[in-house]
Amino acid sequence: MAAHGTRPADGTGADGGTPPGRHRGLLVDFGGVLTSSVIESFRSFCEAEGLAADAVFELVAADAAARRLVADLECGRIDETAFEPAFAAALGVRPGGLVDRLFAGMLPDAVGELFDGVVISGEVGLRKPDPAIYALGARAIGVEPDACVLVDDLIWNLEPAQALGMATVHHTDPARTIAALEELLGVRLRP
């Protein structure tokens, strides 16, 4: 998750005249928001491997051990060398380079130039939707959670942020997300 504390330089809102809203912090999910779709990358992987398009998602949904492997990888409790053979066996594919193959279809989509803080699940041992990671993101930029906006492409990651008082934006495409952020943050993000 990338984080940025924002304030309009001149104290005006997005329309140039009204004061900005109470939201001063921006928390942005990386995969699927700052990159192209994680879902589409996984589907491309499945196609290349000769699997059903949603085989990765179906495995994770149906198999508690597979879910645990993904969570452990994301939180840094295991590394790729431990994850790949176990997940590959459950999926029925070769293990070598599995993580790289799964994410090969992800490309930068809306990469920002500057973040005041970065919270990486594998480094902090937490992952969304654990509320602690949202609070950690806010703390990384020195902004209270209720003054932050969270952007995520996975709708189930939004509810815990809302429970902390954060405004949320469900990212479905860059234009809609930018428009919502201009309104919530009171800053102009488009020329």
Image: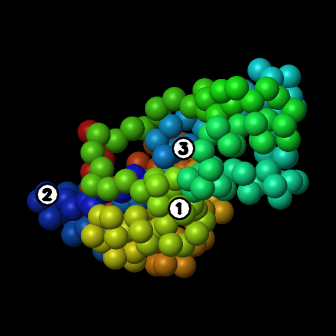
Q: Secondary structure at mark 2?
A: loop
Picture coordinates of residue 114, whole percent (x, y): 27, 45
In the image, is 4 to the left or to the right of 78?
Answer: left
Circle 3 sits in a helix, a strand or a loop, which is it? helix
Of all residues shown, which one is farthest toward the front?
82
Q: Identify the image quadrant of residue 148.
A: bottom left
User: Which amino acid lies under the numbered mark 2 shown in the image of this protein?
Assistant: Ala
Bin the neighbour count of mark 1 within 10 Å (Cα to Cα): few under 14, some 14-19, many 20 and up. Answer: some
Q: Secondary structure at mark 1?
A: loop
Numbered circle sitting on residue 9? 2
For badge 3, the amino acid type reads Gly
Inter-mark Cα distance, 1 to 2:
35 Å
Which disc, if any, is residue 179?
none
Query: Residue 181: where, in percent of width, then height?
Result: 39, 56
Observer able to see residue 179 = no
**Vertical side of 10 occupied by 144: above or below:** below
> Decide: marks 2, 3 in contact (CB < 8 A)?
no
Q: Which one is earlier in the sequence, the residue at label 2 or at label 3?
A: 2
Q: Nearer the viewer, residue 10 or 31?
A: 31
Residue 72 on image: x %, y %: 65, 55
> Residue visible at 64% across and 38% down?
81
Left or right of 7? Residue 38 is right
Residue 49: x, y in percent? 80, 23
Residue visible at 76% across and 55% down? 67
Give the crowd class for mark 3: few <14, some 14-19, many >=20 residues within 10 Å. many
Q: CA distance from mark 2 to mark 3?
A: 29 Å
For label 1, the residue is 125
Residue 4 in which image quadrant: bottom left
User: From the viewer's perspective, is residue 80 above or below residue 28?
Assistant: above
Q: For marks 1 and 3, give the one nearer the viewer.
A: 1
Residue denoted by label 3:
31
Query: Is residue 143 visible to the viewer in this orientation of the structure?
Result: yes
